Image (cartoon, rainbow, N blue to C red):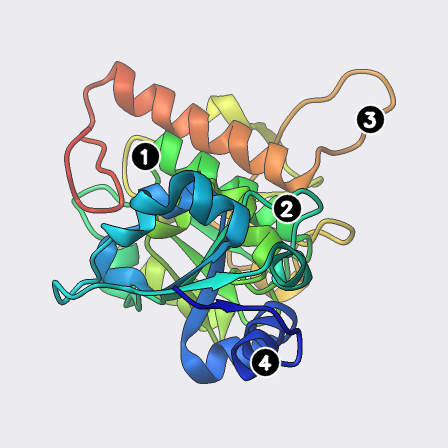
């Protein structure tokens, strides 16, 4: 099987473009995933192309030769010299396998499905690692879905994808051009909205999250915008010791998500994963 040995190759240039530019990813409606775990967890129908380093192919080429795409055909597999693979990789120590994956498109009904939706709403979150961590934690806590304003960091940023640890494949989510309208739509459906806010009068564990609920999480440095915060039914806070005023956005979101999960598990509320399966 031939290998690509030049960084000026058109396929290599495209991969670098997809790695660096959101616009390129949006135009093709694809994203890049790296690493053997992300490859193995990927639903076959999502994988368009697979690129491996020469070293990886010699050691574990059978894994990719047997990998079918969603149509039952053999996925496109390309071998890159180790030097070229390092060039297209977004990691310091590449594992030698990279995939071009198709996106899944979710609508509001998939994000807020079920009798008792449990939703995370993100307002202007900027850190890729935080967003990826929230996705991973949301899956673990049985969150129904995630809604993000357009100002949030790109979920398809390669660093964000790595941080999700595979949850990108399973957690329903959507971006919305008007986050305020999206929150109003949740409220109209009877989904109670809770804002993680420094002005909260109630501790987070004093509220009841067994019904349909959503948590509003703001920007790492500035919190929620006034417009979004004012839409909340209730302001809640996570009590702090010492001189700490607030937690990292991903940590705060995790505390709230798992408190809701604890209450629901204790009282037998049905919790579903992103595919609608009971947990």
Measured Cα–Cα span from mark 1 to mark 2:
20 Å
Disc 4 from disc 1: Cα separation: 44 Å
Residue 157, numbered circle? none
Of pointers 1 and 3, the one earlier in the residue sequence: 1
Query: CA gap, disc 3 to disc 2?
Result: 21 Å
**Residue holding disc 4:** 9
Q: Which residue is mark 2?
A: 129
134 and 61: which is toward the camera:
61
Q: Are marks 4 and 2 in contact (CB under 8 Å)?
A: no
Circle 3/circle 2 CB separation < 8 Å: no
Q: Which of pointers 1 and 2 lies earlier in the amino acid sequence?
A: 2
Q: Can residue 250 be seen by looking at this rendering?
A: yes
For residue 142, the mark is 1
Choose mark 1 or mark 2, whichever is in front: 2
Q: Which mark lies nearer to you, 4 or 1?
A: 4
Q: How many marks?
A: 4
Q: Residue at x 32, y 54 (%)?
A: 172
Q: Position of residue 102 (x, y in %)?
A: 34, 68
**Residue lying furthest left in this view?**
72
In the rendering, at what x and y percent does residue 129 appear? 64, 46
- In three-dimensional space, the C-alpha distance between marks 1 and 3, rounded to whole angstroms, equals 29 Å
**Residue identified by numbered label 3:** 244
Q: Nearer the viewer, mark 1 or mark 3?
A: 1
Frontmost of labels 4 and 2 is: 4
For residue 207, above or below residue 83: above
Q: Residue furthest right?
A: 243
Choose the circle earlier in sequence order: 4 or 2.
4
Where is residue 53 shown, x and y percent of the image?
53, 53
Of pointers 4 and 1, the one earlier in the residue sequence: 4
Residue situated in front as seen by the camera: 34 or 21: 34
């Amino acid at each position: 099987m031939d290998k690509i040995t030049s960084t000026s190759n058109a396929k290599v240039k495209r991969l670098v473009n997809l790695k660096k530019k959101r616009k390129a990813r949006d135009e093709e409606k694809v994203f890049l995933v790296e690493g053997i775990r992300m490859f193995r967890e990927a639903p076959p129908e999502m994988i368009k192309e697979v690129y491996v380093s020469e070293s990886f192919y010699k050691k574990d080429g059978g894994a990719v030769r047997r990998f079918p795409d969603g149509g039952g055909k053999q996925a496109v597999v390309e071998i890159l010299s180790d030097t070229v693979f390092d060039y297209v990789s977004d990691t310091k120590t590449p594992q030698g396998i990279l995939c071009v994956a198709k996106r899944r498109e979710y609508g509001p009904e998939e994000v807020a499905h079920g009798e008792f939706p449990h939703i995370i709403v993100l307002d202007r979150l900027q850190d890729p690692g935080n967003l990826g961590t929230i996705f991973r934690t949301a899956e673990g806590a049985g969150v129904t879905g995630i809604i993000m304003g357009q100002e949030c960091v790109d979920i398809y940023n390669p660093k964000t994808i790595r941080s999700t640890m595979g949850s990108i494949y399973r957690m329903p989510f959507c971006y919305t051009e008007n986050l305020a309208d999206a929150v109003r739509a949740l409220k109209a459906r009877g989904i109670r909205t809770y804002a993680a806010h420094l002005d909260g009068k109630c501790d987070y564990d004093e509220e009841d999250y067994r019904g349909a609920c959503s948590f509003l999480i703001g920007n790492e440095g500035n919190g929620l915008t006034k417009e979004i915060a004012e839409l909340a039914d209730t302001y809640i806070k996570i009590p702090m010791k010492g001189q700490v005023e607030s937690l990292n956005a991903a940590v705060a979101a995790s505390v709230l998500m798992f408190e809701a999960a604890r209450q629901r598990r204790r009282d037998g509320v049905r919790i579903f994963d992103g595919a609608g399966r009971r947990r």
